[in-house]
Image (spheres, rainbow, N blue to C red):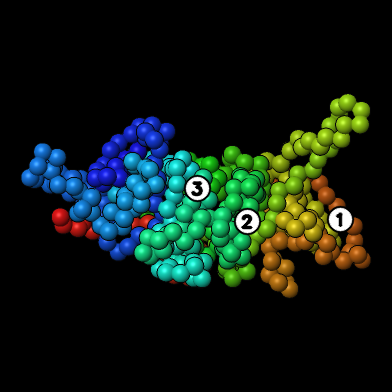
Amino acid sequence: MWVLNTDRAELHFFASPEEVPGGYAALSHVWDEKELSFQDLQRIQLKCAKRFTKKGRNPRNFVSEKIRRCCELAASHGYKWVWIDTCCIDKTSSAELSEAINSMFRYYSLAGICYGYLRDVSELSTIAESIWFRRGWTLQELVAPRSFLFLSRTWQALGSRADFSERLEERIGIPGAVLRLEVSYADFSIAQRMSWFGERQTTRLEDEAYCLLGLFDIHMPPLYGEGRNAFRRLQEEIMKQSADTTLFAWDAPWLEDHLRSCLLAPSPSAFKGRDIVYTPPRCLEEAAPNDSTLTLVDNDMTFSVAPDGILAYILIIARGDETYGDLYWSAGDGSGQVLLRLEADSTGQARSSRRPSYRVCFSKDNRSRLHWEEKLSAESPGPYSSWQTVLLRHRPSPHWFPYGSGSMIVGRSLHSDLHLTSASTPL
């Protein structure tokens, strides 16, 4: 891990965040068009070391204003070290870039304080409108740190994360209790955490997945150029490590049908507004008399990726001509059970399977993939349910899935967030 010393803005390497003596501060910000890179700081440091005095000139006087002001602020708070993503990652090294992407959530979580620099905010009343809240990478930078301080465009303190928790909950959907550190982000379902991404944007399609790795404790190699396949890989990794099936509880009526009929989401934006929790059945534990402790029943539900879909052992519910998958979902407000709508899949790959094959379908009235059990008519015939091993369509065919045209899928354009290159600024 590379960090800057705050008195001279010189790069120093430590094997891990825990080994940085006295701890460090971190900066969260939206990248400007021109940012100093790791190599830029090395050149500045080398030139300053060769001039005039034994110690040379102070490199901090020749870095960008953003880096200098961050170093000065961190020093005033007693920190000798600061981590800034623009210049503390050698992006010419694929190995170092991969390690940084997979470790970034940890870097922010172990920082003594994180400064959220809002370059477009001058007064408190406009803080929630900052572009900072519309960037993909800043989601983990907001959630991970133990201590967080918002700064205005002039580097004046606006307040802590807790100070704005209620306003931010209303604006961006992250529970105020998470922002106040009263509960852990990990206490929320996968669908709920995915929904926090909202309408955030990233420069590269792949970063929609990579910026969420830490939020789900996933490690996987970044492969720039794979497009939206990155988010599919992330979902498959989550599926391997978690029993929480709300991974599939997304709904995006604005998407085309060939995308919405698949089990896996094309983008984290598809989870927007999904307040659904994973609620597997519980039973009374056989314990001492009068002990009513509840424990989870053994969960027999399984999912595995196959070449032509996801092979799943799930509870299938048939009611008249309608079919649902019961994946143990409930509405976050406790209003009832949530089911996944299914229909028989008769595509070529599905017909070749010896298992019953399904794809996700939608209601005719609101085009929702999800069904709230409380909405079933009392006159409807009673349901028939059985555990079955089925094949579920998990992604569209490559013909229908333009990996390089993400803005067409989610109905929005993509703007600047994490740049992999940055212009050099001369000394």
Locate the N terminus and report the quarter of the image it occupies: top left
Judged by depth in the image, the label closer to the viewer, 2 or 1, is 2
Q: Residues within 10 Å of mark 2 (few under 14, many from 20)?
A: some
Quick one: 354 or 195, which is closer to the camera? 195
Q: Secondary structure at mark 3?
A: loop
Q: Residue at x 44, y 59 (%)?
A: 157
Tell me whether circle 3 and circle 2 mark residues in contact (CB < 8 Å).
no
State yes or no: discs 1 and 3 in contact (Cβ < 8 Å): no
Q: Position of residue 53 (x, y in %)?
A: 9, 42
For marks 1 and 3 on the same chain, the one whose residue lies earlier in the sequence? 3
**Which amino acid is tagged 3?**
Ser
Q: Position of residue 380 (x, y in %)?
A: 89, 64
Query: Looking at the picture, which amino acid does disc 1 mark?
Result: Pro
| Label of residue 175 in the image | 2
Say whether residue 291 is left or right of residue 253.
Answer: right
Distance between the alpha carbons at the discs numbered 2 and 1: 36 Å
Left or right of 390 on screen, residue 380: right
